[in-house]
Image (tube, helix red, strand yellow):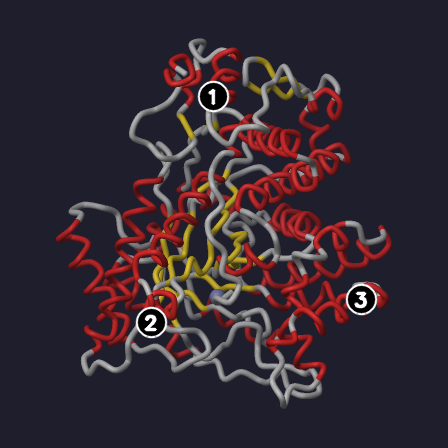
Amino acid sequence: MPDGKACREPMRPSVFVSRGHLGSSCSRTDETRASQHSPGHRNAVTQTQLQIEKDIFGDAVAVNNGRVTVSRPDVLAGERMDTLVRAAVFGQGAEKEYARWLIWEIGQTVGVRPGSIHDLYMARGAGKIGGFTVPAINVRGMSYDTARSIFRTAIRQRAGAFILEIARSEIAYTDQRPSEYVAVMLAAALREGFRGPVFIQGDHFQVNHKKFAAARDPEVKAVKELITEAVSAGFYNIDIDTSTLVDLKHESLEEQQRLNYEVGIELLRHVRAAEPPGVTISVGGEIGEVGTENSTEEELRAYMDGFNRTLEKHARRMIGLSKISVQSGTSHGGTVLADGKIADVKLDLDTLERLSKVARDEYGLAGAVQHGASTLPDTAFNNFPKRETAEIHLATNFQSMLYDYCPRELREEIYGWLREHAKDERKDKDSDEQFFYKTRKKALGPFKRRFWDLPVKVKQELASAYDAKFEFLFAQLGIGDTAKHVAEYVKTPALHPRTAGEMAAVQAAPDDASLSD
Ligand SMILES: [Zn+2]
């Protein structure tokens, strides 16, 4: 495929090329030929085969030679976007891939581009900005509607510093591959008329320590494959999580953290090699297994010193981490009691504040990150910006709201499914409340379409509830008016995937639903 090959940028594993590479030499014919000749491209599409932009947007959006022009941007923020995003999620083969490509290209054209929060975090580490805590929201179920609520709230509060994320485990059990997730998040932003960088993050790109102990290389390779897949899709923020490899058997903190930073660096180098032109991906490290003992300053230093020293030795001048996840008292999902209530959490804010300060002052990072925050009481959240916490992760509470508003018949059907399909996860002492609370995330993938298809009335009730929740959280976390910081520090170069078929050709990485979220 000589013609198709001419369009490829050598030595770069990502599917993206900078604008210059998609000039006139890459005609439609070239793309067609490249698609037809590449393996695994049976569903590859070209603009001549598919014109769903015309069917959906009429003459408001045009595609010529792989370039999108939008003559009436207002049309994007309407019901036609709902049609396009459905094709991107539930469409078949070529139609689905083309819809994802079209959403990406429309976003590139009007200024809704996936971005890296790295430079904003560096500015924070340098003391130029502060006083807010970035919420990283794990969008699991009814993702388009949930994300729409997030962008609506962001527009109202002029917020720019917020992250949409999905963990390695969640990709598996919510049935959302990175390319689908990116399409849905961008479509939600476009639907609400949001403009600016969209920070999409891979959360807990985690090494499974049991699999690692059995066979190191295949497990590290699986995480690398996920990084390749996610970066190709538009994830420019990644939390590598090798904290599962911390070994408390060793006496010195240095030895305890050694595998954590050594494998962490191996993954960081893989991230840097996969970066598209002009993008420095924000990479987070993690020291404390969330739900276990609280982290200490000494642990943070042992990890960061080991990380930086080793990185310097093996890859001089490579850009390192932007933030660090620690443990200060929360647990993923919260701890559910037998009656279904969530146990109170003893959040150690002093520890969190000290760790953030050490991370900023001694290592130039944005600060500390706390996971498992969504189930904290409402009164807890305004402490995070006061204590200069860089970022918190919010997941389970939004899922709880989804189930609270879910029509009873559907919930019963899902619980029946869980009794059968999640019975292995049931502990003898679990009440029904505890069992369903802990396992119902696993139904989000199998019932994805049913959640998307909830009756309009239910969706409207959920939308109001989500709006109120995000309004509250964004205000408590102090991220109102952060769009100006994002505009100042974050640049998003134009990035164009070659064709829909090539976007689709990136292989899905091996799944593991048992990891942290
Ligand atoms: Zn987490």
Badge 2: few (under 14), some or many (20 or more) residues near its Cα, within 10 Å? many
> Element under label 3?
helix
Q: CA distance from mark 3 to mark 1?
A: 45 Å
If you read the primary sequence from the N terminus, does the residue marked by circle 1 or circle 2 appear first?
Answer: 1
Quarter occupied by residue 89: top right
Q: Where in the figure is residue 191, as x and y percent of width and height?
A: 69, 38
Q: Check the picture and name the quadrant holding the N terminus.
A: top left
Identify the amino acid type marked 1.
His
Q: CA distance from mark 3 to mark 2?
A: 45 Å
Q: Where in the figure is residue 164, as x and y percent of width and height?
A: 54, 52
Where is mark 1, residue-wise?
37
Viewer-side residue, 188 vs 217: 217
Identify the amino acid type marked 3.
Glu
Where is mark 3, residue-wise?
413
Residue farthest left in this picture: 313
Where is mark 2, residue-wise?
355
Numbered circle sitting on residue 503: none
Identify the amino acid type marked 2.
Leu
Q: Where in the figure is residue 335, as x and y percent of width and height?
A: 58, 81
- Give the residue displayed 55% in from the left and 54% down from the top: 171
